[in-house]
Image (spheres, rainbow, N blue to C red):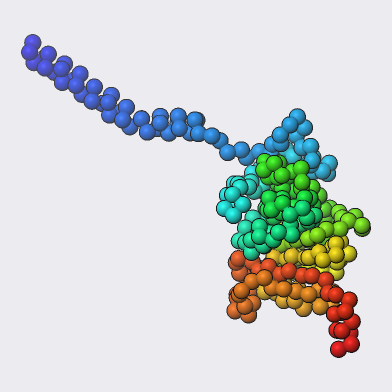
Amino acid sequence: MLKRLGSSHHGTVSALALFLLSGLLLLPLLFGTFKQTDAPTVPNRYVFRGSSPAPRMPAALHSIAGELRIRQWHYVPDLEVELAQFETVFWEPDDTTSLRRRIATDSRLQGAVALEIGTGTGLIASALAIAGAQRVVATDVNPRAVANALYNLQNLGLDDRVEVRYVSPSDPGPFSTVADDEQFDFIISNPPWEDAPVESPAAYALYDPQFQLLDGILEQSSRHLRPNGELWLAYGAKTAIRRVLERAHETGWDVEVDDPRHLDELPEVFLPGMLLKLSRRSEAQAEADVIN
């Protein structure tokens, strides 16, 4: 009788030990489940405020609204903001570090009107609005980039001062969405730097076939700049920078390299990018060049 009671007691203790051990093993899993449920979820869908799903989205892009996804969120320390990056939209903030620094410190941007060619996620357009630009026009040939910029600008409460325009791939020129009489205090771009064919709208962020975009910016910007206006270009590739320096004179620009580094000492592709500030040559200087 005592033996049977002892055996029963031993079995009860073993069962209790197994129960406690199972609880300890399951506790992290349960805690992880509850933690995951309670944690705020990061949105990965394209959602606008208000009753309309995309009040400022060009009609040509409505067909892709249901396909848009957020690939990643990025915190930009110098702007103290977080930006969403949509799928297929290019992201390399180090390419425009010097450009954003100039935007943040140049008092002439207060109340200015600016054009950004190739906005991507809207990073530079956001920096311009935060710096005090009165009005910004931002363009892009990738429809998902247009949607991406709209999304970020609305989240930051900057969409009332920034207009995002969609550039059709059938007419991808730098000023195809700009009216003939439309002028700006600043025209700004971080263009693609590699001369290679483009097979999709998203590839325009990386490739500029035969540097047609760059040449178009150099040849056409002056007619869209107000007196004393400037063209700012940010590049992280020597080939593209040398092309700007070579073509600036023949297209009527003076160039200031706003960077302490020497181009010859840099690799072909480098980060952070280099800022080039271009201003129109005065008539007197142009006449002197002709005489000489």
Quarter occupied by the C terminus: bottom right
List the single residue furthest toward the right. Answer: 180
Residue at 73 percent of width and 66 percent of height: 233
List the single residue furthest toward the top. Answer: 1
Residue 57 is left or right of residue 29, and the answer is: right
Residue 264, percent across and down? 63, 80
The answer to whether residue 157 of the structure is visible from this angle is: yes
List the single residue furthest toward the left. Answer: 2
Report the number of numbered marks.
0
Residue 20, percent across and down? 27, 26
Q: Is residue 289 above or below residue 95?
A: below
Front-most of 56 and 72? 56
Residue at 89 percent of width and 76 percent of height: 283
Residue 49 is left or right of residue 19, and the answer is: right
Say which quarter of the image contains residue 78: bottom right
Front-most of 88 and 156? 156
Say which quarter of the image contains residue 222: bottom right
The answer to whether residue 211 of the structure is visible from this angle is: no
Residue 113, percent across and down? 80, 54
Front-most of 71 and 287? 287
Residue 7 is left or right of residue 39, and the answer is: left
Quarter occupied by the N terminus: top left
Residue at 19 percent of width and 21 percent of height: 13
Residue 117, percent across and down? 77, 58
Residue at 92 percent of width and 57 percent of height: 181
